Amino acid sequence: MLVPIFKMILCSSLLIGIYYLFLQREKMFRFNRFYLLFALVFSYVIPFVKINLPAVSQQKDQLIFDEIPTQQLIQNANQTSQFDWMNFILIASVLVSIVLIIKSVISIKKIIELKGIDINYQNQKVKLIEKNLPPFSFWNKIYLNKSYFENQIIDNRIFQHEKTHIVQKHSLDILFLEILRVISWFNPALYFYKKAMTDNHEFLADESIIQQKNNVKDYQQLILSEILQTQNLSLTHQFNYNNTKKRFIMMTTKKSKFERTKKLFVVSAFAGLSFLFVQKVYASEIETVTQPIPTEIAGNNFKKLDTIPHRIEGKNNVKLKNSKKVKTPPAPKEFKENELPIPPPPPPAVNAKPAEFPEGINALRKDFSQNFDSSAFGKKDGVLKTSIYISIDENGKTTDIKAEGPNQAFNDEAVRSMKISTADKVWKPATEDGKESATVFKFPITMNFQ
């Protein structure tokens, strides 16, 4: 999950960088508006898109599974559990998002609750407010102080400027950006998108006034007189000082002869970034083989341990909790002819059931085979083996996945593939004496590179 999020941030940063380098000074405001909106949608979608590509080689590899994976019940799981940083980060992110939602709701509430009189002016909703604020628009309504409504008339330049924001639905752009900011507040590129988007909205509104044959200098003087007043309402469009210089420049800027070239460059950039940030899955010809377990050990596939086994200093032995030395059993007693030995007592019945993958073990093998990318390995690797340990809690949730084998790259790919295969899947938990219990699912695999 972290990789797509990182790609999302990087992609959105690159696209806003392209905007500031090549597009912000161009007098193609409608195209720029589309670019900013599409760049956001593109950045947030493309990292999660998967494309299947043909295999990079013609080799047919064998992926071998043991017929019966082993499991190990975990006792005293609460004593051995470690602090889950991922859950902590997730909870912290949700809390920040909730705070941002509350702030946005408060901002909207402040706008709606402004005291004033609602009127209909030239088929447009207008609210004449008592508070001394410069004109602004939000959603489908224009807000301005009563002093602007002299002799039942509003300055047409102010009225048309704010009406343009409403007609072109600029508030939707801001609200869309606000939603992204709530769910991905950690993306610093969104600050630059909001600034670019707000500037572009003002350019579009100014363009509508200039096209009505209004005197440019008089209109600029009107803007200067309005920016002396201030307001602290977010999510709105209003006259403000921060982008005044840019607006004045764009009012007199001529269209560039390189507009078409820059548009073609932007299209090419999207195509290149699509291939760069999409999740590429290389198809590999993998032959799946199920390797039977010998009869004498097939039944012993469910063991009970106090802790999960860990490799110690590269050795293959595992250390059990409270382990004791075991003495060599005495030699068996010799019996006389026609004297039969007393049979040993039957082993105690273990009332335990292993955890089960939702669609069964074969479905897990199939998903794992499809997600496994063998393109990084070849004939030189020969036969590679690893054992995947899947920790499953008493609720059937996968809590940890590790792999132990001599080849670290093979281990990493096995873990990656298994995480994808088990993502959002809830196992049927293991049970012991009728109670759900945490378990470790051991999944040995062997890959034969021919």
Image (cartoon, helix red, strand yellow):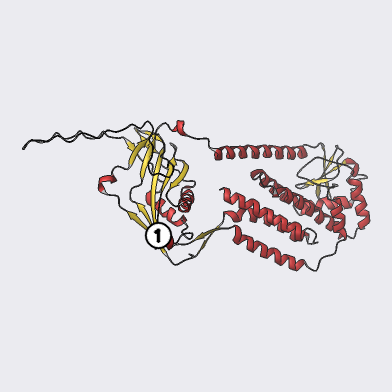
Q: Is residue 222 visible?
A: yes
Q: Tag count in the figure?
A: 1
The structure residue drawn at horizontal position 65% and vertical position 40%, both measured from the top left corner, is 97
Residue 48 pos. (x, y %): 57, 54
Residue 384 drawn above or below residue 437: below
Q: Tell whether 105 sits left or right of 128.
A: left
Q: Nearer the viewer, residue 45 or 171?
A: 45
Q: Confirm whether residue 40 shows in the render.
A: no
Residue type at mark 1? Answer: Gly
Along the line of sight, which residue is nearer the eye, 131 or 448? 448
User: Considering the image in quadrants, where does the C terminus appear?
Assistant: bottom left
Q: Is residue 297 left or right of residue 172?
A: left
Label 1 belongs to which residue?
Answer: 382
Q: Nearer the viewer, residue 434 or 265?
A: 265
**Seen in the image, is 258 located left or right of residue 179?**
right
Name which quarter of the figure residue 62 lies in: bottom left
Quadrant of residue 110 within the rendered picture: top right
Q: Give the SS element for disc 1.
A: loop
**x then y, percent, for residue 77:** 43, 33
